[in-house]
């Protein structure tokens, strides 16, 4: 089976883990051990950010950013429904209301025009998602946020190595949240990061990451235990150095696969708009005018042939049982997209020969 994604772990990562274990320092009381601090500095530099705050998961990064932005019960946060549930989950955990909006059918990201229509007096933040590794259209979203005095928390969990207007994700946001889950473009096994250019936000998030403490046993505010272990940070440092090569191979594979599938009139291929750089976390095609069952049959055929095709995401969040209580919006594009898309492997472990096989098999499967 050619998996949809697989961690690219080598001897250097293994050696880094062993070095940490031999050092005897495997965590830190305030979440800021030597490896974590090194990783934060390196990640901040790579993402052109003043600060990076390491945490234990990408979901923790989102939750900490929401809490740090002062979002409370009774507030509203605007986000796309077509994404992974964690983006909405952290809003509900705070006691705020997720306000789901529709997506652009070409990029699968939230449209700035739709965001502005959803703003009310209760709106306090916007959470755009860089879905599949393609950044959202952040400059007009920033203009909308400034106009209405709203925070922007960018879910960049899938966008390592992407760029927008030649800038890394997060530049137009108050905070950007990253995931290092095993399937991501770079991994620490689990793990997450928050990047920001705001000194005050960074200091607050560092306190909140460790029980609200500035010093051990002296809590200044409500916090959490979201420490990243030293072993994760050691892996992250190595993976960050390798990330440009990872992205280069993903881009190469995506380009080859698009060329192979270009003759398929039934497929809408993923796009990289001018001024954007896709990270190709997921190479997602769309079966035009298809119903969910037809798409699912094709995915099953591909799996039978040894191709780990997957559907991201089968159900938009606003249609999931728990989230229906927040309203019943009719999100036409999100619902249609969920019935038609499926993703194909382009990760760095996929060979040129396998790309040819994937392309040929997909062409046969859709006919």
Image (cartoon, rainbow, N blue to C red):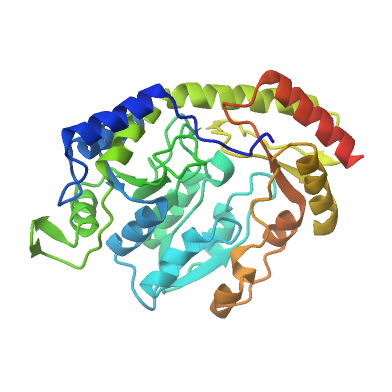
> Which residue is nearer to you in this view: 80 or 16?
16
Q: Residue at x 29, y 45 (%)?
A: 54
Task: Indicate the position of residue 97 as horizontal and vertical percent values.
Answer: 46, 73
Task: Indicate the position of residue 192 as horizontal and vertical percent values.
Answer: 37, 47
Residue that protrudes farthest toward the right in the picture: 367
Q: Residue at x 21, y 42 (%)?
A: 26
The quadrant holding residue 19 is: top left
- Any part of residue 146 in sight: no
Task: Look at the picture and state if 108 lies above or below 353.
Answer: below
Task: Indicate the position of residue 129 as horizontal and vertical percent values.
Answer: 51, 50
Task: Look at the picture and state if 320 lies above or below 363.
Answer: below
Task: Indicate the position of residue 310 as horizontal and vertical percent values.
Answer: 68, 47
Q: Is residue 250 left or right of residue 242?
A: right
Q: Is residue 263 left or right of residue 353?
A: right
Q: Residue at x 38, y 47 (%)?
A: 176
> Which residue is nearer to you in this view: 91 or 314?
314
Q: Is residue 31 left or right of residue 99?
A: left
Marker count (numbered): 0
The N terminus, quarter of image: top right
The quadrant holding residue 186 is: top left
The C terminus, quarter of image: top right
- Any part of residue 190 in sight: yes
Q: Residue at x 72, y 54 (%)?
A: 337
Q: Is residue 157 left or right of residue 322?
A: left
């Amino acid at each position: 089976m050619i998996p949809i994604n697989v961690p690219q772990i080598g001897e250097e990562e293994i050696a880094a883990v062993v070095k940490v274990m031999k050092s005897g320092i495997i965590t830190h009381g305030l979440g800021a051990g030597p490896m974590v601090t090194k990783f934060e500095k390196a990640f901040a530099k790579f993402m052109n950010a003043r600060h990076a705050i390491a945490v234990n998961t990408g979901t923790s990064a989102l939750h900490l950013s929401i809490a740090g932005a002062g979002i409370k019960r009774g507030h509203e946060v605007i986000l796309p429904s077509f994404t992974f549930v964690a983006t909405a989950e952290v809003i509900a955990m705070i006691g705020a209301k997720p306000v789901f909006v529709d997506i652009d059918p070409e990029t699968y990201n939230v449209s700035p025009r739709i965001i502005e229509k959803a703003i009310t007096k209760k709106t306090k933040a916007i959470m755009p998602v860089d879905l599949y590794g393609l950044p959202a259209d952040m400059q007009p979203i920033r203009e909308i946020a400034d106009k209405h005095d709203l925070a922007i928390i960018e879910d960049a969990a899938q966008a390592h190595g992407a760029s927008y207007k030649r800038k890394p994700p997060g530049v137009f946001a108050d905070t950007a949240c990253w995931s290092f889950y095993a399937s991501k473009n770079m991994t620490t096994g689990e793990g997450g990061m928050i990047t920001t250019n705001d000194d005050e936000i960074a200091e607050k998030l560092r306190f909140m990451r460790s029980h609200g403490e500035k010093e051990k046993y002296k809590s200044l505010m409500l916090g959490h235990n979201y420490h990243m272990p030293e072993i994760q940070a050691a892996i992250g440092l190595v993976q960050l150095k390798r990330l440009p090569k990872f992205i280069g191979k993903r881009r190469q594979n995506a380009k080859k696969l698009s060329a192979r599938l270009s003759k398929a009139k039934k497929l809408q291929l993923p796009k990289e708009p001018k001024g954007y750089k896709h990270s190709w976390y997921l190479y997602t095609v769309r079966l035009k005018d298809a119903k969910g069952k037809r798409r699912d049959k094709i995915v099953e055929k591909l799996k039978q042939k040894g191709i780990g095709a997957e559907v991201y995401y089968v159900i938009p969040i606003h249609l999931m049982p728990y989230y229906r209580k927040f309203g019943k919006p009719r999100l036409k594009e999100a619902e249609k997209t969920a019935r038609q898309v499926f993703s194909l492997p382009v990760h760095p472990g996929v060979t040129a020969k396998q790309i040819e096989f994937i392309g040929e098999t997909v062409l046969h499967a859709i006919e």
